[in-house]
Image (cartoon, rainbow, N blue to C red):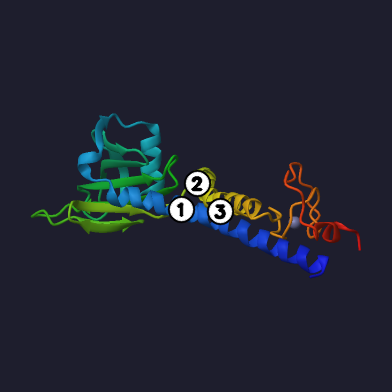
């Protein structure tokens, strides 16, 4: 095999591994986030009631799907449920209907998921319209997957949070890399045991591999095979 072909093949292999590595890291981070949101049962969540802050009001105003209802006011405290890699926040707000002038109540559930940082976000909105007699709540918008499971409803976010996804992919990349690194190490050890070059698998371990040119800092102490001198000789 010519050197150019081998270099080209090695580059291609490196590109495939790098692509697999990046894609695997991102997919791994997303699957983990969705898995936590799907499988974390209500009983595992720690619930807190907290006063709403400026950031909560900003989030409501930027995300609210009904622009025609005016003067949204957050009501009461926000209910936060946390689990490692998952945060669910329930909000309630009141606005005045442009048609009837009556106060209408909306609730929103915001879900952030991802480990170690939130990398997916989603929200689900309900509106209780002002009507007499009171009607049933309308789903205004859902930027998340809603699933009914045996242990209750689940909101699975899917909108990526770029910074969180990047950081989670880096962490996941470390875990994803363990597979090929372990495989490469095992292959090197196996080649060494079988008396082959750990880099390319060519038979015989001399001070320098005649096939790939790798210099072995710790050549095999066992004397080379009789044909080794022929293999290491310059052409
Ligand atoms: Zn070699």
**Distance between the Cα atoms at labels 2 and 1?**
9 Å
* Label 3 lies in ligand 1 vicinity (Cβ under 8 Å): no
Neighbours of disc 2 within 10 Å: few (<14), some (14-19), many (20+): few
Tell me how many marks there are.
3
Q: Quadrant of ligand 1?
A: bottom right
Which residue corresponds to the image point at 10% horizontal and 54% vertical from the top-left?
Answer: 132
Hey, which quadrant is residue 234 in on the image?
bottom right
**Residue extending furthest left?**
133
Please report contact status of discs 2 and 1: CB closer than 8 Å, yes or no: yes
Name of the residue lying farthest toward the right: 235
Image location (x, y in percent) of residue 219: 75, 45
First in sequence, mark 1 or 3: give its number: 1
* Label 2 with label 3: CB-CB less than 8 Å: no
Viewer-nearest of discs 2 and 1: 2
Q: Nearer the viewer, mark 1 or mark 3?
A: 3
Of 53 and 212, nearer the camera is 212
Residue lying at 27% horizontally and 45% vertically, measured from the top left: 95
Instruction: Tell me which residue sits at (68%, 53%) in the image.
Output: 198
Side (left or right) of 18 relative to 125: right
Residue under label 2: 175
Q: Nearer the viewer, residue 4 or 154?
A: 4
Figure quadrant of the C terminus = bottom right
Between discs 2 and 1, the one toward the N terminus: 1
Question: Would you name the residue on which mark 1 appears?
Answer: 28
The answer to whether residue 65 shows anywhere in this view is no
Disc ID at residue 183: 3
Q: Which mark is residue 56?
A: none
Tell me what residue is drawn at x 18 percent, y 55 percent: 137
- Binning the other alpha carbons within 10 Å of mark 1 as few (below 14), some (14 to 19) or many (20 upward) gives some
């Amino acid at each position: 095999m010519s050197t150019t072909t081998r270099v080209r093949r090695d580059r291609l292999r490196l590109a495939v591994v790098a692509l697999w590595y990046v894609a695997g890291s991102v997919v791994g981070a997303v699957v983990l986030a969705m898995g936590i949101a799907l499988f974390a049962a209500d009983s595992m969540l720690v619930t807190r009631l907290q006063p709403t802050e400026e950031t909560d009001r900003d989030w409501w105003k930027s995300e609210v799907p009904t622009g025609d209802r005016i003067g949204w006011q957050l009501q009461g405290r926000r209910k936060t449920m946390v689990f490692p890699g998952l945060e669910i926040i329930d909000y309630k707000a009141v606005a005045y209907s442009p048609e009837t002038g009556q106060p209408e109540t909306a609730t929103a559930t915001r879900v952030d998921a991802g480990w170690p940082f939130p990398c997916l976000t989603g929200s689900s909105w309900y509106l209780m319209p002002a009507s007499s007699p009171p009607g049933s709540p309308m789903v205004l918008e859902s930027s998340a997957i809603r699933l009914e499971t045996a242990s209750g409803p689940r909101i699975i976010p899917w909108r990526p949070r770029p910074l969180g996804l990047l950081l989670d992919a880096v962490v996941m990349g470390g875990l994803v890399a363990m597979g090929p690194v372990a495989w490469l190490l095992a292959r090197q050890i196996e080649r060494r045991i079988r008396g082959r070059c750990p880099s390319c698998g060519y038979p015989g371990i001399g001070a320098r591999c005649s096939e790939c040119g790798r210099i072995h800092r710790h050549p095999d102490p066992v004397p080379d095979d009789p044909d080794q001198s022929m293999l290491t000789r310059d052409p």
